[in-house]
Every structure is written in structure tokens, then in C-alpha cells.
Image (tube, rainbow, N blue to C red):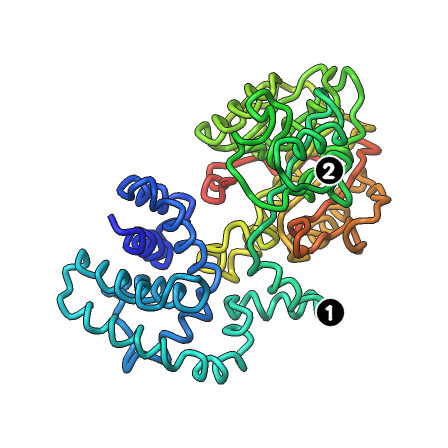
Amino acid sequence: MSPRLAAANALATVMAGKASLGTSLPAQMQHVAERDQALTQELAFGTARWFQRLDGLANALLEKPLKAADRDLHALLLVGLYQLLFTRIPAHAAIDETVNAAKALKKPWAKGLLNAVLRRAQRESEALLEGLVRDPTIRLAHPRWLQKQLKADWPQHWEAICAANNLHPPMTLRVNALQGTREDYLISLLEAGFAATASEFSPVGISLEQSCDVYRLPAFNKGRVSVQDEAAQLAAPLLELQPGQRVLDACCAPGGKTCHILELQPALQELVALDLEPRRLQRVRDNLQRLGLSATLKAADGRDLDAWWDGQPFQRILLDAPCSATGVIRRHPDIKLTRQAEDIAALATLQGELLDRLWQTLEVGGILVYATCSVLPEENTEVIDDFLQRQPGARELSIVADYGLPQPHGRQLLPQENGHDGFYLAKLMKVSASHTARSYTPEDKGTAVT
């Protein structure tokens, strides 16, 4: 299959609201030659990254909008425009290959339309965009609801957030402290021909100048390092881990923080790694195995205590709560298409429910760290504020750090060019027995953690 058609098919599924690129693209990759898979991924992710700008240009170029039944053609047109505006692919090759990909659509008229629109874009896109980018949704390539929300929440930072979201993410490593120091591994990278620098905030973080296949990294297969964004590396140290503790990592997949907890404190009594879906736990299992670590893996909704908790309290809990993922859009640009404004309130409710239920499993004197990869206060500091009002036995602990922005509760990291993702952290201590939260009911399954 043509890489342009594969990318368009994957995007059309996302545009229809049926899947994310994480699920739709691998299915298309099976039909693409190995030599074309990198191009396919670049076209799919790049088109999603700039979707609002490309779609605005497409609407200006088309005499009339395409029908819903022609979503596949719409996606292919956007893939063609992406090549013209954002890649070094020669214009004639981009146009010809995209038009040829239309043969598989079984729409004879599509080739002529694509050819005409793309050639017009080659001539007129610069002039058309000059007028279109007055609309911040098109200029910043973010859906209108999110652009307006970021502007309201972060009036001094919203444009920088959008700009960072549109960049390719850096590749960041976490050095396994059980196997050596960051300084030693930086030397190993240099000797292997990799340009890299120590991360600014994480004491075990390393940023690579160029992304690469992980198995090219020195001793990766032996567990010497893992791939993890710097912001995510800041969560586990806040737990203040001690030998002999029982620890819960809730919503743990794919297991980066699970492994980091064990690297920081290998002498735990037990680490329970909990996630909703068994298939997601396989990623956790694979990561643990590569690093030579072990944990107790359980598949269940964190709110359904009867399904997974044995009644023995935890001294530490890390809750990496399901969220809008608005802090990691540069890694998952299809979030701009799949996430909707109405999702945020539902996610905040779910986050509060998880906090309430998991709090019951925490020992008095224990610490819970709440984390999300969202930049929206409604999912972060506001969730913690509501929780503290519900739970008089909870006390917030200060996060003394030089990263992020202090919030009414916790600290917010915003995505940085050549730096960390957007991330939120709050730290709570249980100072007295908790109020019992509402019992988990069958109705809750309609809002199960994903």
C-alpha cells in the first residue's frame, strides 16, 4: 500500500471518531513496505499535528466542502497539503504520488479533484494562508475549544504552549541508577557516537540530540536506560520511598513510573502495579522483565476496591490519573482531533473518584502523589482543591522544586521546546482516617478508567 494512502486511511478513522492514531496506524502499517513505514508515520502524525491549518487551507481551496462519505479523500488531500507545506518532498513528487494513491479509493473523479486542488495549493497557499492565519485556531493549529481554554487558563503562556505542542518531541532517557550513574552513561553515549546532554531537572535524565532506535542505545536491552520524558521522571522521587514499604502504582501502564519506583527503592515489601486493561499490563510486564525488576500486576478499575485490594494498607501511592493528555500533544497530535471540550468535566469527575477510593487504601501517615499529563487546571489544581475539601484527613505537602509553576495546589509544568512535556504534580499526606467514599457501583463502569 502507498504510504500516502495508509496515512490517509489511518487519519480518516481518527477524523470519524472511531480510533486514535495509536490504534488506527498500526493496522495500516501492516500493508506498507518496511522501507516506507517511517514516511507513513511522518505523514500521519504530521498531518494530525497541523490538522487545523491544513483543513482551513483545504476549505479555502475547495469550491464546496467534501461530503462525510468522502472522509477518505479529505484525509488524503490533507496528507498532500502537509507534504507541500511541511516536508522537503519535491512538490511534483508530493502531488503525483498523492494523486496516484487516490486510485484505491474507487472514486474516478477523485484524481482530478486532488490534482487540481494540490496544484492550486502549490501556487496560492502562501497568499491564502496569509489571510487565514489571522484566525488563531488556524495559525496555532489547535481546535478552537482548546485554543480558547489555554488562553483563559494561561494568558501569559498559551501561545508558547501551542507552539511547543506543534514541535517534534525530544527523546529523553532515564538512567537506571541500579546499574550506574548518569555521568558514566553519558560517556557511553559519546563513545557510541550519540550527542546527548544531562536533563535540567531530573538527576537521572538524558536528552538525545537526535531520536533513534532504542536498541542502538548502549546496553538498552540489558536495562541500563529507559525512554521516559523528563517531567514523568519527577513523579516517583516525590514518594520519599523507604525500604519495606508497600507501594501502589495506580493507572500504571506502560510502566515507566513503575520501573522508576523500583530503581529508586529496590527493597520495597511489595509494589502493586494496577491498570484497567490486561493488554496494557503486558507493556508493564515487558518493561519490568527488560530491567530485571518485579512487581505484582493487577488488572482492575482502581475505583472497584473489592476487585483488587486485599485490605492491606499502602504506605505510598502514585496515582497517574487518566486525563486529557493536553500536556503531551506533541507526542500524540491526534489528541487535537479526538479530545472534545465536554470530555474535561467527565475526566475531572473520574479523577476525583479515583482519589477518593484509593485514599481509603492509604495508611495514616502515608503519602499519595497525584500526577497527570494535562495542562488544564480543571484536571489538576481544581481536582486537588475539591478533594481536600472532601477529605479533612488529607494535608497537602509542599513540592520544593525549581521546575514548573506553583499553583494553588501542586506544581504545573508546561511543555518546553527541547525540554519536558506538560505535566502536573501534587503531593498529599494522610494525617487521619478518611471518610468512606461512595461505593463503586455498576453505573461507574460507564466511566471506566481508560
Circles 1 and 2, Cβ within 8 Å, touching? The answer is no
Give coordinates of residue 293: x percent, y percent. 62, 18
Q: Secondary structure at mark 2?
A: strand
Give coordinates of residue 261: x percent, y percent. 69, 27
Residue 315: which disc? none
Marks 1, 2: nearer the viewer? 1
Q: Name the residue rendered at 86%, 44% in the picture.
A: 400
Q: Name the residue rendered at 36%, 74% in the picture.
A: 58
Q: Using residue 341 as the reference point, say whether residue 186 is left or right of it.
A: right
Q: Identify residue type, mark 2.
A: Val
Please, is residue 274 above or below residue 138 in the view?
above
Q: Which residue is mark 1?
A: 156
For residue 74, which quarter of the picture?
bottom left
Q: Identify residue type, mark 1.
A: Gln
- Residue 163 seen in this snapshot: yes
Earlier sequence position, callout 1 versus callout 2: 1
Q: Name the residue rendered at 62%, 48% in the picture.
A: 373
Give 16 or 21, whichever is nearer the viewer. 21
For residue 48, which quarter of the picture?
bottom left
Give coordinates of residue 233: x percent, y percent. 70, 38
Give coordinates of residue 30: x percent, y percent. 29, 39
Q: Which residue is mark 2?
A: 369
Q: Secondary structure at mark 1?
A: loop
| Circle 2 Cα neighbour tier, 10 Å, few/some/many (<14 / 14–19 / ≥20) | many
Q: CA distance from mark 1 to mark 2?
A: 28 Å
- Residue 360 seen in this snapshot: no
| Circle 1 Cα neighbour tier, 10 Å, few/some/many (<14 / 14–19 / ≥20) | few
For residue 356, which quarter of the picture?
top right
